[in-house]
Image: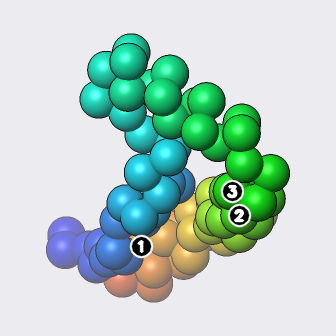
Amino acid sequence: MKTSAVEKPTVAIIHPSQDDLTYSNIDDAGSKISSVLASPTRQEMLRDHLRHRSELFSTDVYMEEIAQTVRIFLSSSPSNI
């Protein structure tokens, strides 16, 4: 039995351009955290960015993607399942 897989691009919660949210070591983390804490503007930008990105990973989106995968599987499978 051959089934079709739903192919979607991989999406990260943190976009690579948001390097304030990733770090390579403890010193780097401390420096980035301090920098963000010192900048209310940057904090708001990060909040907005994460608010938007969180929509991609919501429970509703997850449930819809699972339901879509099941529909595709069932539509490509023999009717005796």
Disc ID at residue 20: none
Splitting the image into 4 quarters, where does residue 63 fall? bottom right
Amino acid type, callout 1: Phe
Q: Residue at x 76, y 60 (%)?
A: 41
Q: Residue at x 29, y 29 (%)?
A: 24
Q: Relative to 30, is 67 on the left or the right?
A: right
Most extreme residue toward the left is 2
Mark 3 residue crowding within 10 angstroms, few (<14) / some (14–19) / many (20+): some
**Residue 58 shows in the view:** no
Camera-nearest residue between 3 and 66: 66
Q: Is residue 23 above or below residue 62?
A: above
Q: Report the residue marked by disc 2.
A: 45
Type of amino acid at the residue the image marks with label 2: Met
Q: Which label sits on residue 73? A: 1
Real-space Cα separation, disc 3 to disc 1, in angstroms: 44 Å
Residue matched to label 3 = 42
Classify mark 1: residues with Cα within 10 Å, few (<14), some (14-19) or many (20+): some
- Marks 2 and 3: CB-CB under 8 Å? yes
